[in-house]
Image (cartoon, helix red, strand yellow):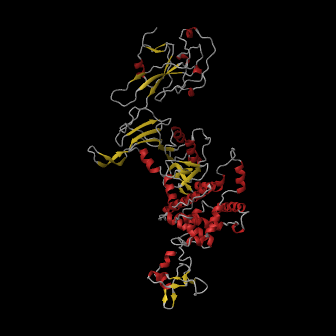
Amino acid sequence: MASGHIWEIKDEMFYNDGKSLEEADCESETEELLVSESSESCDSAEESSEDYLVFDRTHYEQWELPNETPTKKSQQTLPITPTRTQQVTSTVCPSPAGTHEPSSTLVTREAPPSAVKRGHSCSASDISFGSQGIPSKRARAPRHVLELVEEEEWHDINDEDEQPHIPPFLPERPPGPQLASNMMYSPLELFQLFFSTSVIKTIVDNTNKFGETERAAAAAKNRWVPLTVDEFCAYLSLVIYMGLVKTKNLRDYWSRKLPYRLAFPSSVITGKRFAAISSNLHLCDPQEDAENMKKKGSPGYDKLFKIKPLYTDIHLACLTFFQPYRELSIDERMVASKARSGLKQYMKAKPTKWGYKLFVLADSASGYTWNFFVYEGKRATTTGKGLSYDVVVTLLDHLLLGRGYKVYMDNFYTSPSLFAALLQENTLACGTFRTNWQGFPQTKRNDLPKRAKRGTIRWCRRGKLLFVKWMDTREVHMCSTMHKAYAGDTVKRRVKNEQGEWGVTEVPIPVAVKDYNQHMGGVDLSDALIGYYNVLHKVKKWYKTFFFHFIDIAIVNSFILHQQMAKARGEDPVTQKVFREMLLLQLASIFSNKSCSPKRQPPLPERIELCMPAYYSTDGTSARRKCELCKKAGGQVKTPIYCTNCNVPLCLVPKRNCFKQWHDVGNHKQFM
């Protein structure tokens, strides 16, 4: 036997030519050591640039051993009997004192059981290496491989991190509205980009078909009157109006009682007609819908068939008329509903807990809803990598992948596999992460203390993936492929000093956290714009809920297009409230055949009805009421005359003209 140190794994002996294991380890940290019975050694032709070489089944094909009879030399070696488990001993080469470099560990790993046949021996001379230090296909598998494994460690802000490569931003179209910049578009023209004439005509045709089918056996007075495109525009104007002016009951919009008496609804359409249109509203063909219902429970059944015509057109319009800027955000959106439906979801962390869930990709700067789809429930994922992975890939689509976009998301979507896949498509990603998910660093070396000071940072890099822990009010965990760990940024926080006094101080903040806070709110901004004046009504049919939400998406996206184009021309855009007021008046004018100039805000109607005197009965001899103006003065004078618009009794006699005095002081304006 040769002299030297002996490594013992179970009952097998290995020698290292008289050198100690510590010396051999420290001599070359990246060289792979192959342990065999032979005294010969085999080094790779070219040392790998990686920190360690992992001998894995995926790095080579199935090993094939020759069927030749063992030679005399190979018979003298110690035979290796394959077993399921081997006891592994490791030796640690300590780091130099005073440094934060992670220690290296020599670990022996067992080769795949299929690589060695029972009764055959394997020596280092049987192994050949390629140019990258990977065993060639013709080589035999060693029974044991000795690896140099570098243990992960968290770093602090004193350790310098490198800035990752940022691919160039090459969008398919110039970012912003995809409309002629030298033209001025009215709110109605922008809205018609999403609710086009063809879309409205489809809804009108399907509503008429459904109305005739449902009302065929009804009484003559309830028989359905065919709906027209112009009348449907008037219906849309009232829907938008109801988002601006709220009442507790739908009938209050047409009530003649105080304190309602709203003039606009009755001037556009009657209450009964509005209720009839709402009751028979249908987005898809009733006959095709009946055929789809017969497939319920089978793979051919379409859960979203009732909303498909409008759903498809709105989705395509959102993609067509706007190109997002570089920063994007992905999140869920809840459309409030407690109706009985298999599509309804519950999310306790959302302000709207019950409703229908939409996955949305929005432009971070403007809040424009660029891509979205309705969540239909549990289904077989297309990639087999989970729902969150599929959602992000579906929303980004081929129109954005490979263009250098930056995507921000929360911990539901963040995963190393997703970020690595996006990086291969030249798409950068940043998001919060859950520390207990598979693939995230679990090392405790130099980890963030439980009671760390506010602003304490720990980071760890695994290839091009950066993991950051930051202590704010609580721990914040980030993962990114576009940021370096720390770039000197600070943020103001209110903290308590050593004397127990509160004060404002600046604490360090990672770049990933700073950019996440700035760009993640795209979907939230879109939700806020919708929530200010949303047109959603309480309905029993789930597809009508989506109809009202699609109106909101169309209005908000139209308003954002107006904002972007006004800023490009150097003009001040109108507010969303004014934009909606202009839009509903222009929609109502289509039905009333009144033209509205697209270049300026249409004037508000001064008076819907004229104030005219009339008798309560056929003449002035009966049906008297107390005069409203005399009653305010303390009198009890009765009069047979009233104002047709104000609907109040007023005196109109030669010696006293309360009718004129009432209107001169402006009392009638409260009824306009």
- Apparent side of residue 589 relative to residue 477 in the rendered image (left or right): right
User: Is residue 248 something one can see in this rendering?
Assistant: yes
Viewer-side residue, 316 vs 214? 214
The percent coordinates of residue 362 (x first, y second) are 53, 52
* Number of numbered discs on residues: 0
Up the image or down, 129 lies above or below 626; here it is above
User: Is residue 166 something one can see in this rendering?
Assistant: no
The percent coordinates of residue 73 (x first, y second) are 55, 9
Residue in view at x 43 percent, y 29 percent? 151
The percent coordinates of residue 565 (x first, y second) are 52, 61
Up the image or down, 67 lies above or below 29; here it is above
Residue in view at x 48 percent, y 89 percent? 656
Q: Residue furthest bottom?
A: 654
- Apparent side of residue 473 relative to residue 54 in the rendered image (left or right): left
- Apparent side of residue 202 relative to residue 169 in the rendered image (left or right): right
Viewer-side residue, 188 vs 70? 188
Viewer-side residue, 517 vs 531? 531
Q: Residue furthest left?
A: 499
The percent coordinates of residue 5 (x first, y second) are 42, 13
Residue in view at x 63 percent, y 13 percent? 68
